[in-house]
Amino acid sequence: MNAILFENVSRHFGNVRAVDGVDLAVAEGEFFAMLGPSGSGKTTCLRLVAGFEQPTAGHIEIFGETAEGLPPYRRNVNTVFQDYALFPHLSILDNVAYGLMVKGVGRIERRRAAEEALAMVALPGYGARKPGQLSGGQRQRVALARALVNRPRVLLLDEPLGALDLKLREQMQEELKSLQKALGLTFIFVTHDQGEALAMADRVAVFHEGKVRQVGTPEDIYRRPKTRFVADFVGSSNVLSRVQCQRLGVDAPAASLRPESIVIGRPTDGQLGLTGIPIATSFLGPVNRVTLDCGGERIVALLAGGAPIPAMGESVTLAFGRHDLHVMEDAG
């Protein structure tokens, strides 16, 4: 069964088409990422699932039930926000139990459920503290526990890791993924961070200008982008023009070529090659980033740290596998 189904869904705010004719299906038990830049429509789609917004047109189902007009409290979903939205004057235990209190659950039962939820997110014994006494990562765990204590079938996460530093964000990515697998819940995760989406999701929907440009596994999205926007936004990619494709003997309006697929040297059997002139280099730790001018088009290569760096201004040959060149449907 689909946990969430969008059929030609739109949400307009005056003349602004925040969501424009979106078709989308999220499977039950899936970790699904909505990825895109600010204003692309991903958060509005999340709010449509939560019931905070209603569609201007189209149809939404949650586990087969029509969602249009259904208030948020009648949807078996919960949301974790980026700013956590914790009550600063309440204890951690009372913050986690708040939703159960609103539902009329008895004090003893809601305390037990809240303690179980805190243990689930690795915060046992923190119930008596206040939010101000916790770190950012701990507050994020509390917000997660508060959502999970209501036993939703779908958990909506709106850029929940955006306020954390890099190391803590990577740790929370692993914890969220492990928790989702252990619980078997459907997670819908909104982010503008490509690396985060690729690392965590079973499938990714890439949004741009209110539309879904591509849906697929992280590997599909990364290695086989359908459009120039997807190729540029998801990771770093070289987009070869029709002219460059023709030089390579490929009939296509455009093709993507990931920088890590390129080596400096003459092509061997089964490889393709381009000639370029290095114009800039950057040291990135494990790799060196080399920018080359290839017939008026810029190509970026990522060379392993031990590989020799070509001299600036001297013509070199770039080699890559034919399978590394992915023909795209849209050059725009």
Image (cartoon, rainbow, N blue to C red):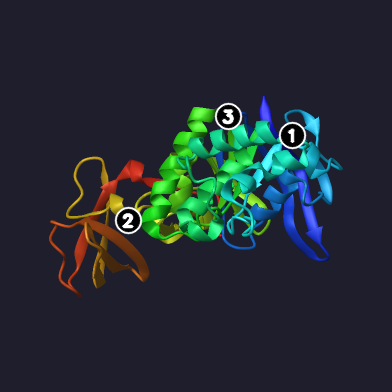
Disc nearer the start of the sequence (1/3) = 3
Disc nearer the start of the sequence (3/2) = 3
In which quarter of the view is residue 23 placed? top right
Q: Quick one: which residue is furthest to the right in this view?
A: 69
Disc 3, SS = loop
Separation of disc 2 and disc 1 at Cα?
A: 56 Å
| Crowd tier of the residue under label 3, counting other residues whose Cα lies within 10 Å: few below 14, some 14–19, many 20 or above | some
Camera sees residue 320: yes
Measured along the vertical axis of the image, is residue 111 above or below residue 242?
A: above
Q: Position of residue 199 (x, y in %)?
A: 42, 44
Instruction: State the residue in front, 28 or 142.
Output: 142
**Could you tell me if the residues under marks 2 and 1 are in contact, i.e. CB atoms within 8 Å?**
no
Q: How many numbered marks does the figure carry?
A: 3
| Residue at image location 39% in from the left, 50% down from the top | 170
Per the rendering, the mark at residue 259 is: 2
Judging by the rendered image, the residue that carries numbered circle 3 is: 29
In which quarter of the view is residue 19 placed? bottom right
Judging by the rendered image, the residue that carries numbered circle 1 is: 105
